[in-house]
Image (cartoon, grey):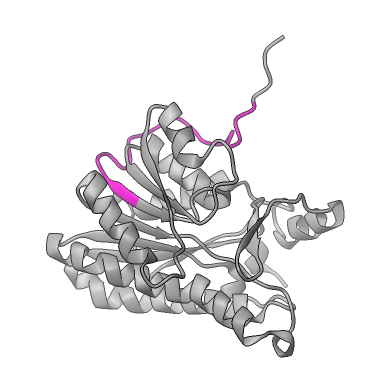
Amino acid sequence: MAEANTDEHPMLGESRNRLPGKVAIITGANSGIGRATARLFSREGASVLCCDIQETMTPRVDELIINEGGTASFLNVDVTSAGGPEEMVQTAISRYGGVDILYNNAGGGIRKKIHEFTDDEWNFIMDLNLNAIMRSVREVIPHFLEKGSGNIISTASTFGLLASENYPAYCATKAAVISVTRQMALDYGPKGIRVNCICPGATETPRFRGVPPTPNLQAATPEQRKRMADSNKALLRMARPEEMAYGVLFLASDEASFVTGHALIVDGGQTIAV
């Protein structure tokens, strides 16, 4: 009897060499969409600096990539800290000689009504989902300007376009990510730098919750899974992380050379009907 396929990302296909020689920084890289994207980027020829605050997923993403013959390393870093983004960029430059792609993927949310938020909770989500992007971009842009090219991608959300009950900080920050993506595309496009974001629908990923962030890897209940699947109104299932990773890969690749300021919706039909 053949062995069962235990690959955690079974939808990843064979390489088509879409990122040959590129260097990518990915935040939130050790789980969910970031983990699948790091693996896919490596498969497509990139060297990947995998950045995350948690190392609980095993094997760790860089080890998984290296075991497959790819080039990757891990940096335990808090993107909400003052020095975290600078450390990321300088580490990528020192290890790999430069940076071509910055994928701002780290993020999270707290579900409660706005009047129930403490200042610490609200400010934490602002720092994680929005301010960390600003600081990371601020660190990488001088390098991109010097070489006359670069690619910035961020994870927004369909909840940056829609509303979701008891999710004010998350929805606010993800809407801001979409808006600042468009704004940065205007500022940096003439310098050869593309800026885009991806808006995932409900996806089978672990998430960060709480202040400080702690990995929440408990499986969703059947009722929660059904609700998330039903929210993707046309396909009626949750997405796989790999399906989001391929959206990010498109934006990172030369196939998207005329795409900038775009919010790529990958949502199984969530946003096409009420």
Q: Where is residue 210 in the image (x, y as percent from the top left)?
A: 66, 69
In this view, the residue farthest toward the bottom is 115
User: Does residue 13 show up magenta in the picture?
Assistant: yes
Q: Which of 77 and 242 is in front in this view?
A: 77
Quarter of the figure that contains the C terminus: bottom right
Instruction: Give the residue at x 13% y 64%.
Output: 146
- Measured as percent of width and height from the top left, residue 90 is found at 26, 57
Q: Note whether residue 188 is visible.
A: yes
Tell me residue 160's x, y (percent): 57, 74
Is residue 132 shown above or below 215? below
- Please say if 238 is above or below 3: below
Extent of the magenta region: 6-24
The reply to whether the magenta stretch includes residue 253 is no
Residue found at x 25% / y 60%: 150
Q: Residue 12 vs residue 122: left or right?
A: left
What residue is shown at x 44% (from left), y 58% (from top)? 77
Q: Is the magenta stretch mostly helix, strand or loop?
A: loop
Q: How many labels does the image show?
A: 0
- 210 over 42 or under it: above or below: below
Asked where in the image residue 69 lies, by quadrant, the reply is top left
- In the image: residue 27, left or right of residue 48: right
Q: Kindly identify the residue that appears in the image at 36 percent across and 45 percent down.
A: 48
- Spot the residue most to the right: 223
- Rendered location of residue 245, percent (x, y): 49, 48
Whether residue 100 is visible, yes or no, is no
Quadrant into which the N terminus falls: top right
| Nearer to me, 225 or 237 | 225
